[in-house]
Amino acid sequence: MKVNLDIPKNKQFQSFYLFAILVSVTTGVEMIGTPRIIFLEAGHDAWISVIISYLLIVLLLFIMLYILKQYENADILGIHADLFGNFIAKLVGTLYFFHFSTELFAALLIYIEIIKVFIFPDSNNFILGLMLISLIIYTVLGGLRVVIGVCFIFMICSYWLVFLLIDPLRQMELINFLPIMDRSITDVAINGVLATSYTFTGFEVLFFIYPFIQNKERVKKPLFLGISWVAFVVLLTTIISIGFLNPAQLERRIWVVLTLFKIQTSPIVERLDYVVVAEWMMITIPRAVILMWCIIYILKRIYNIPKKISLYTTLGIVMALIPFIRQYYDIQTIIEISKYFDMGIVYIYPLILLPIVIIKQKIKKKRGGKQHAES
Amino acid sequence: MRPAKKNNGKSALPMSVDQLKNKVESLVINSQDLNYTTYQQNEKQIAVFYIPFLIDHTKLEESLLNPLLSMESDWSTDTILSGIPLASGKTTTKLEDTVNGLNKGEVFLYLEQDKQLITYKLSKSEKRALERAETEAIVIGPQLAFTESMQSNLNVISWRLNTPDLAREKIMVGERNPKEARIIYLKSVANETDVNTMRQRLNDLKVDMIEDIHMLKQYILDNSTSVFPQYVATELVDRATYAVKEGKIIVLVEGSPLAMVAPSTFFSFFESTEDRYFHWNLSSFILSLRFLAAFVTLMLTPMYVAATTFHYELIPSQLLMSIGQSRAAVPFPPILEVIIIELVIELLREAGARLPTKVGQTIGIVGGVVVGTAAVQAGITSNILIILVTLSALASFSTPNYVMGNTLRFVRFPLIIFASMYGIIGIMFGICLLVIHLVRLESLGRPYLTPLYPLRLADFNKVFFRLPEQKQGRRFLSYRLKDKHTYGKNKATVKKDNEK
């Protein structure tokens, strides 16, 4: 396996679009339920958990960037091939493949579930899944240019939703936040952070998309701004949920954020939450599309499977599984099972990788220096 | 067979006038059209032959036959060429050339027993005069439109863009009936890659003949399955020359009254030349109105179908009351009702476009007033729907480009069907599909959604709004033109006559 990749110039993209990629891939369907999940762990101090996990993720992103910068133009698989050899690289690639596949599967399932709960209670899983998957296929067949374009344009098209939060923001009860730091430190700083960080999973695509960036020296700014924007939105929804609903209501409502949209009306549209559920397709699709692109990329790189074959097989399997999962409980079980695996591969693994990469680079430098001195 | 014929013709040339007549008549397919006359001077015979309806007869008589017959010196090739007051005299030795030449409107002269033929180009092509634009009607600004004649089109373009920088590359397109196509661009501004792409696409084209620029457009499309037009075709001269000035390429074809502008973006179909002539804030308002209209024409009737089929909760109760009342008598489901009325509107449009203008107006009144009112009174549709359908049709006609307006109206039908199947989710699916499709499209290898994606904020003032003219000095940066500025940043200083 080649460590450093030569990407032709027409397949590279400007680092600016990393913002759109990061925002699309970290904001998924789960965001609708996130405030409640954090609230269950950290109580009304949930917003502190969000801030802590934001800081941790920024740190992690810069660690990932540091690892990638040790090489000329390598992705995570190339780095593994360099460190541990081809076999381990293939193994890690396969792990990432399963990680992305479950993420994709969960994303589609949750969105279908939301549609069923809010709009069409007795609609067919299969047809809804087919709709989403046809969109994914159509996008991914266009290549990386189209994938990023779809992320970017859908991001622009869907961010008016933030402005709809102004109304509940004005109706907040500030008393709900008092007393601050009421819950124990473990609840806020560990359980709460763990619950939050699951929402943010997705930024690990940086490991795969990095070789395609054209101007790598300007990567930091869009990366930092992207993750900050997502964290801001999560923080905003969490604060508004806590301030707007009382604790008992918040515990009972699974899709809290939609409740916030539900209270508003306009002269033309009575129930804005319907529009929001539909609009959420523009948030689901970009995430699914990037995950799908990564899956194809991994399979192509480690097993050399052609693009179309891996695309159709993966989505075929997802499609075949979607009709079997009907209850929300089943989805929750899948998420619970894959949660620890996902957290491990996204949050812990780069930390393990970091010292090894540093040591390897030092040895290389020493050896290189020696050879240089001898010759 | 062909080489043999060629040899015959070549070797046979010193011959008598009658022999030549037989020879030419055997070569020309329509020999009954041939006008073959012989004249005599001092026992030397000269044959003059041509196809009468391709020839300018006044020129023939005044400039060719009169001087020829009143010539005082003896006839020879040299005396004829120098004695006749026409510039386009040539000689040829091949008899095969006569066939082509006759069809192009050339007159041939042959001196008995000479080795060569003398030809003069006296062609006359029937064409209409320059007129004002019909399909792209504008209120202010130049209204001159192209015609079918390449000569006059080139003339008009050179008149408006009078610079030595203007490249007019000639490429013959078509195998059986080659037609002249011209790639026109500014040499010091246009992107070299784009010019090469266009040149290559035209050169690679293997077709019998090109009837119109729209045919050529379809042959060289980037994505031929898309409904969206990928090149702007305009009949306005000033729009074409403005595109050239901005660094784009235009293509003209002999016999077509339109110029094709490449590369084009999705948004350039919503531009009108008037945007540049109006004051900037006014034209920004009109531009945004057009985009709003495009959105309305896509969304209005699908939303009606979605709301009345599935989501009554979406509609505020006051509005729901009136919709319910007007729909109470309608026996059809919303989807059928909408499809019927949409098709009626499409029929009216098609009939209006095909019929002569006076009858077309009548049809409009009959269709709009009589059918509309009658349909509501008969209980076939609700009157709210009539309003919505009319509004969305109106909105689609506000798109300055006729082809794009039609495309938008076409795209609405799948959206209506999706809406009838899955309500608002179906509409969203359709919109997502549309956006992904637009992201995938290219025009001459350039992304169709430029400057939105790839994003270039500096170009937004050409597309979504306009700035005061002195701030519009930059050309369209997304196309990587050679010269990025139309003028410097200096504003014309405001001067007043001093009263001193």
Image: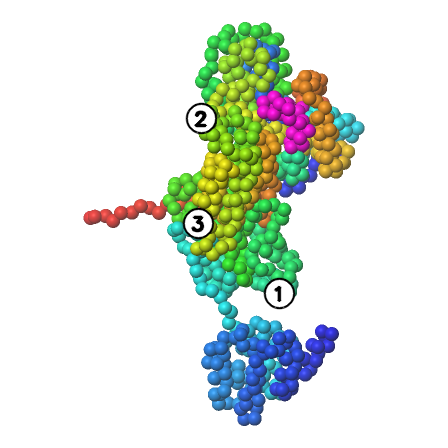
- CB contact under 8 Å: marks 3 and 2: no
Pointer 3 residue: B273
Q: Which of the two marks, 3 or 2, is nearer to us in this view?
A: 2
The residue positioned farthest toward the bottom in the image shown: B42
Answer yes or no: are tags 3 and 1 on the same subunit.
yes
Q: Which mark is residue B318?
A: 2
Q: Residue at x 54, y 62 (%)?
A: B255
Q: Amino acid at mark 3?
A: Thr
Q: Earlier in the sequence, mark 3 or mark 1?
A: 1
Q: Residue B60, image x and y in percent? A: 50, 79
Asked whether A113 falls inside the magenta stretch, the response is yes
The image's colour scheme reads: rainbow
Q: Which mark is residue B177?
A: 1
Q: Residue B351, image x and y in percent? A: 51, 51
Q: Earlier in the sequence, mark 3 or mark 2?
A: 3
Quadrant in the picture for residue B339: top right
Which secondary structure dominates the residues rendered in magenta? helix
- CB contact under 8 Å: marks 3 and 1: no
Magenta extent: A106-133
Q: Is residue B314 above or below residue B431?
A: above
Q: Nearer the viewer, residue A55 or A96?
A: A96
Q: Residue at x 54, y 73 (%)?
A: B54
Answer yes or no: are tags 3 and 2 on the same subunit.
yes
The residue positioned farthest toward the right in the image shown: A87
For disc 1, the chain is B
